[in-house]
Amino acid sequence: MKGELLLIRHGKAGSAEPNKNDFYRPLTEKGRAEFTTFLQTIQSQIATEGLEVWTSPLTRAKQTAALFTTELELPTYAEKVFLADGNLEACLNALKMKPNFRVACVGHEPFMSMWVHELTGVRTPFHKGAMMRIVFDGADVKLDWKQSPKS
């Protein structure tokens, strides 16, 4: 399998509240502003040609994907349930259908850091709004870079 996978954790969202459906929890205004500023600073590191964007269907992830596609002038994103439930096998199966894939996936913790570890063997924190680029070259899978609004 050959390709590039850009994993993105959604930006800062409002706090979870008891008796409220977590599915609809939105980004905060601070989270939107921080992620947009972060994108502007790292935009040159993201090759956008042929880049597909997949997102979890949860509101905060879709809002992050919308900021990402707007700021980088990409076509719209596609919702993928496996990004909400952390099903790495389903993600890999979808990627296998695309030779030389270039996909950005917007999802959630703890799944994003678990995926990085399972794919590359690297354990690393995955802050809100952070991105990690994983390169697949046959059996060789490596963490190429990671960026965070905190760095």
Image (cartoon, grey):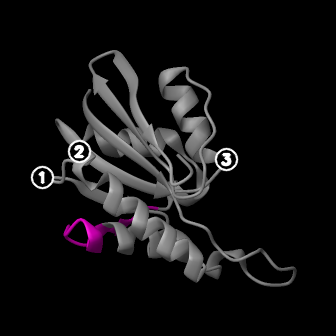
Which is in the foreground here, disc 3 or disc 1? 1
Are the two marked residues, 3 and 2, in contact with CB atoms closer than 8 angstroms? no
* Residue picked out by circle 3: 110
Question: What kind of residue is marked 2?
Answer: Arg
Tell me which numbered mark, 2 or 1, is placed earlier along the sequence.
1
Callout 3 environment at 10 Å: few (<14), some (14 to 19), or many (20+)?
A: few
Q: Position of residue 91 (x, y in %)?
A: 42, 45
What secondary structure is found at the residue carrying circle 3? Answer: loop
> Magenta region: which residues?
69-80
For residue 141, which quarter of the picture? top left
Q: Nearer the viewer, residue 146 or 91?
A: 146
- Toward the right, the furthest residue is 18
Residue 127 horizontal/vertical position (percent): 60, 50
Q: Position of residue 9 (x, y in %)?
A: 53, 55
Q: Image point 78% across, 84% down: which residue? A: 20
Q: Which residue is mark 1?
A: 49
From this view, report whether residue 79 is shown above or below residue 7: below
Q: Nearer the viewer, residue 102 or 143?
A: 143
Asked whether the viewer can see residue 130, the reply is yes
Q: Quadrant of residue 85?
A: bottom right
Which residue is most to the left? 49
Q: Relative to 78, is 126 above or below?
A: above
Quadrant the N terminus occupies: top left
Amino acid under label 3? Pro
Q: Are marks 2 and 1 in contact (CB under 8 Å)?
A: yes
- How many angstroms separate mark 3 from mark 1 (CA)? 29 Å
Q: Where does label 2 land, which residue?
A: 102
Is label 2 in a helix, a strand or a loop?
strand
Q: Reply above or below: 140 against 59.
A: above
Is residue 73 rendered magenta in the image? yes
> What is the spatial separation of the Cα atoms under label 3 and label 2, in whole angstroms?
23 Å
